[in-house]
């Protein structure tokens, strides 16, 4: 084998490994202790999308003024988020108070996502056959 061919194949291997590497970004979603139910659902749905794309999500509860006297409200919100996103995510960093913010980090749970995808596929076509369209009566 000549040296030029060796260099070319080595470059191709490096290029292939770089293409397979995944870039995991850390997204952040900020909540407040007095968040309304609609806003909570919208933000939590967006966090689920981030996790579905394979990103880690840092969830921050921002306290202001006298809200600092009730960190249990923030903990309750973080627990509710983790409960709703349980099949998609696992808790990487448990809730902790950091100054005026309470922080928790969620990471995507690949095994659970794959299992959910398989279950959805088998539910759509239980015996592997395509659904037969019914004939319309004229």
Image: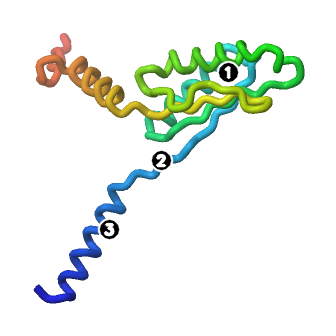
Q: Earlier in the sequence, mark 2 or mark 1?
A: 2
Secondary structure state at the residue bearing disc 1: helix
Secondary structure state at the residue bearing disc 2: loop
**As displayed, is residue 83 above or below residue 90?**
above
Contact (Cβ within 8 Å) of mark 2 with mark 1: no
Q: Is residue 102 left or right of residue 8?
A: right
Q: Earlier in the sequence, mark 2 or mark 3?
A: 3
**As displayed, is residue 55 above or below residue 119?**
below
Count residues near mark 2 (Cα–Cα under 10 Å), then give few for <14, some for 14-19, many for 20+.
few
Quarter of the picture holding the N terminus: bottom left
Q: Which residue is mark 1?
A: 39
Contact (Cβ within 8 Å) of mark 2 with mark 3: no
Secondary structure state at the residue bearing disc 3: helix
Q: Nearer the viewer, mark 2 or mark 1?
A: 2
Out of 20 and 98, give the one closest to the viewer.
98
Q: Quadrant of residue 108?
A: top left
Q: Quadrant of residue 45?
A: top right
Q: Earlier in the sequence, mark 1 or mark 3?
A: 3
Gap in Å between the C-alphas at discs 2 and 1?
A: 26 Å
Out of 124 and 46, give the one closest to the viewer.
46
Q: Which residue is mark 3?
A: 15
Q: Is residue 16 left or right of residue 40?
A: left
Identify the residue shown where x is 30% and y is 30%: 114
Image coordinates of residue 42 in percent, x first then y, are 61, 24
Out of 123 and 105, give the one closest to the viewer.
105
Image coordinates of residue 135 in percent, x first then y, are 16, 15
Gap in Å between the C-alphas at discs 2 and 3?
A: 19 Å
Using the image, tell me which numbered label, if any, was put on residue 24: 2
Identify the residue shown where x is 49% and y is 41%: 55
**As displayed, is residue 107 above or below residue 23?**
above
Count residues near mark 3 (Cα–Cα under 10 Å), then give few for <14, some for 14-19, many for 20+.
few
């Amino acid at each position: 084998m000549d040296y030029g061919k060796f260099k070319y194949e080595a470059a191709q291997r490096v290029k292939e490994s770089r293409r397979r590497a995944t870039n995991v970004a850390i997204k952040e979603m900020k909540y407040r202790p007095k968040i309304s139910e609609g806003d909570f659902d919208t933000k939590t749905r967006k966090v689920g999308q981030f996790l579905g794309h394979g990103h880690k999500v840092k969830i921050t509860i921002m306290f202001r003024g006298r809200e600092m006297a009730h960190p249990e409200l923030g903990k309750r919100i973080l627990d509710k988020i983790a409960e709703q996103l349980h099949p998609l995510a696992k808790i990487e960093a448990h809730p902790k108070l950091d100054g005026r913010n309470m922080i928790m980090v969620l990471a995507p749970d690949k095994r659970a996502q794959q299992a959910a995808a398989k279950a959805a596929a088998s539910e759509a076509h239980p015996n592997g056959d395509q659904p037969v369209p019914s004939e319309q009566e004229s």
